[in-house]
Amino acid sequence: MTATMTEVATTDDIRDTILDARRDGTALEVRGGGSVLDRMPGDDGAVLSVAGLTGVVDHAAEDLTITVRTGTGIDELQEVLAASGQECPIEPTDAAGSTVGGRIATGLAGPRQLGAGRVRDWVLRVRFVTGAGQVAKAGGVTVKDVTGFDLCRLMTGSWGTLGVITEVTLKLRPLARHRAWYTTTEPRHDLDGVLFRPVSLITTADRTHVLLEGHPEDAAEQAELVGLEPAERPILPTAARAALDPARVPEFLAAIAGAGLRWAVQDGVGVCHLDGAVEGMVTARRAAEHLGGSVLILEPSLGLPAFGGSGPDPIATRVSEVLDPDDVLAPWRWSR
Amino acid sequence: MPLFRRTATRGRQQPAGAIARPWLDGASDLTPRERGLLAAVHGIVGDDGLRAGHLGRATYRRDASFLNADPVGVALPRTVEETAGVLRACRDHGVPFTPRAAGTGLAGGATPTGEEGVRPLVVSVARMDQLRELDVANRRAWVEPGLVNARLGRAAAAHGLRFAPDPASQIAATLGGNVATNAGGIHVLTYGVMSQHVLAVELMDANGDVHVLDGRSPELASLDIRGVSVGGEGTLGIVTGACLRLLPAPPAIGTMLAGFATLRDAAAMVGDLVTSDRLPDAVELMDARAVHLVEGYANAGYPVDAAAVLLLEFEGLPHGVEAGIDTAERLAHANGATSVTRAADADQRARIWKGRKAVAGAIAKQAPDFFLQDVVVPRSRLGDMLDEVVAISEREDLIILTVVHAGDGNLHPFILFDRREDGVLDRVFRAGHDIVMTALRLDGTVTGEHGVGIEKRDFLAHVFTADDLAVQQAVRSAVEPSGLANPDKVLPSTVGCQEARMVPEGAWV
């Protein structure tokens, strides 16, 4: 089947496209920069591209907030903020083509998740168009806000199934004075308990990569404490990522030993990046699901479903039904 | 000198005479449906788990707000199973329920309001107060909803850990309530509010079924319903358990107290701090009235000649903490600080914080009544907002003292009054209303951490469009389809042009 692509430039365009799809009984895949979706198999429906909705709406440096349109590149966001000595630590594993809206929609965090928290923690306000065609917002521009239900958390990681995100307001922080990658000479899964709040700990079969931020003398003392050597930023596997309770990671690694996979674990976080053949991935998915986690396949040539898990629970299903009553927004999401 | 003259405590005398069924306490105003419900609930929780008499109900009419209403009774289950039984009894009798724990909420979220003629059952989880598991290796704790916030803090501290959300009420407020309101506190500026620290929620629906909303895995192949349940204010079900994230205690802490000649200078200092190269972990502002009051009460060493004081804290590794405090001291002088004190040791640090934490206690000792507000403005509007609060206090001839989680732009003006003064309540609520509307005018919002409850409910129409609210209502109904969980809260009953009232119909002051 050939995909049709609708490019939209305004919220009204999005609403009209959704209402048309409701009327016609068709379904849409929402696409930003394509950095994730282009890597996922089974994309054969109509595509609603929001890549044209770009630009900074308001950077309130003194309030530590920024409002951007959904298609704004992560690169552009970081550049604008760095000019003011600020950052929003939402970042992709692999930067090319990543958009702000895409990061929020997928909820996939980069390698600094241990120190910077999850994507959801940086989202203050989301404007979106629901699958029913309602133009709505959740949250507000202040950094603390409990006005109404917390739908920003719901929209983050909803993978385009509840609404099309059009604009987001993000929380910011000062850029760290110093940032450097280090490495150990052998793998160590215990460093989160030894170092004080390291920003990233990535352990592979033969070493642990450590990212330290903050005052340079503090970083030097922390590095000295466990004998870290300066190093380059590690290159992570990209074919799949397992996610599970960090407490279950040792069991997961034991279960995939011998499955022929190259892996890199974000210690203390519970994300494990994977490369390898299909048999290994099947083993990894079975192991992760057995431990209450999941595996997201990002390499289409593997021929495996991207999610392939049990799908949403009854409450999540009811929430989907009210926001997308006619199954317009990627109704296939969790089963493909 | 005291701000108000004190007189004998008001109160009701306990009725005399023998009581056949202690939990009924002679209540005679029950409908057949209510009698049926209470009999069923009594069968589950027993004599000591049910209060349905006048006196038993009276103490559960309100939370720490002024808004109160009469419940049909109060159930105090001891276990998750008993709670499930109580909710099933409510369902079977068509009676709504209002979840509650310590009742420290300030927005009427635990006030048992319901539709005309239908009194809800208060379901208190206060007796489910155990720390189920402290998982030191994985830095997290499984807690029951009635566990007091500070008790978790003490248990964690014994292992070099801490729980970040620290609302001022933490010595009484429970973690179930903290989850329900998405609570904040002093040290949430860099660590984030409650939602960021809730790894899993056990949410009981109106059928008594528990849904484990598990977010221990960082990525879910599903929707983040846990995120919606935090801050649900009891309208999405009852939180019967939670898994909370703990953080390592910081190796170094730097605390500073600075006095300023004007509120504007202090606000400008806050602006400079948040745009400097290291965000403090706490920035608290107190106005002159607050300083005077607590200094006379807690003797914390605050400069009583200052128009405002700032309390700052940096935590972490020693060099970063030192650099942060140095920068803060330089910025304080640049903004005309009249005094700067760096805490030399843990004792001095404790003394500085004692003053901030004593505010509510000091007020309770001085004023018969106070009405505490909670609004947020963008940090750059803090100076404007503080000026407006002063203007409102002068206009209404009321004493208002203000403490601010300044790093977050989150103001807590305390309106002090004596309700026996003729017409004072009108002025108090008008002032409260004006404070909220002023925050909205300055691009702020109506509640930062106390929640919407019923007090702020009608203001939501000023924040959200009809479509925004329709989406919120749709999500609420999807998560909790029965409509029995804490009805009448959070969302305005009629969306649109209704005038926002601090005291909605069905509640009494």
Image: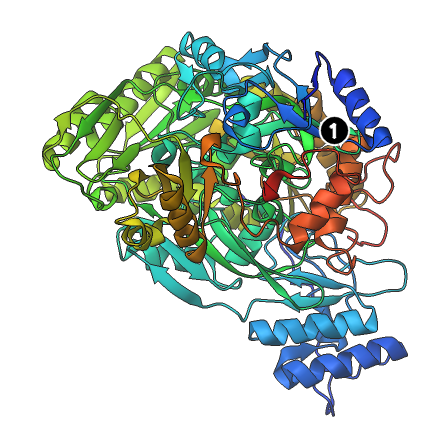
Q: Quadrant location of residue B279?
A: top left
Colour mapping used in the image: rainbow
Q: Quadrant location of residue B325?
A: top left
Residue B309 visible in rendering? yes
Q: Nearer the viewer, residue A121 or B460?
A: A121
Q: Position of residue B20 (x, y in %)?
A: 74, 92
Q: Position of residue B160 (x, y in %)?
A: 26, 51
Of all chains, the one bearing label 1 is A
The answer to whether A214 is drawn above or below residue B457 in the figure is above
Q: Nearer the viewer, residue A119 or A95?
A: A95
| Mark 1 burial class by Cα count in 10 Å: few <14, some 14-19, many 20+ | many
Secondary structure of the residue carrying tag 1 is: strand
Instruction: Name which residue type carries label 1.
Output: Ala
Q: Position of residue B9 (x, y in %)?
A: 65, 63
Q: Position of residue A210 (x, y in %)?
A: 23, 31
State left or right for residue B209 relative to residue B459: left
Q: Residue at x 41, y 46 (%)?
A: B298
Q: Which residue matches tag 1?
A: A136
- Counting the numbered discs, the total is 1
Q: Residue at x 47, y 52 (%)?
A: B170
Q: Residue at x 49, y 34 (%)?
A: A121
Residue B303 visible in rendering? no
The answer to whether B68 is drawn above or below residue B253 in the figure is below
Q: Residue at x 22, y 24 (%)?
A: A181
Q: Nearer the viewer, residue A328 or B331?
A: A328
Query: Hey, which residue is sitting farthest front in the picture?
Result: A1
Q: Quadrant location of residue A133?
A: top right
The answer to whether A90 is drawn above or below residue B242 in the figure is above
Q: Nearer the viewer, residue B293 or B334?
A: B334
The answer to whether B22 is drawn above or below residue A82 in the figure is below
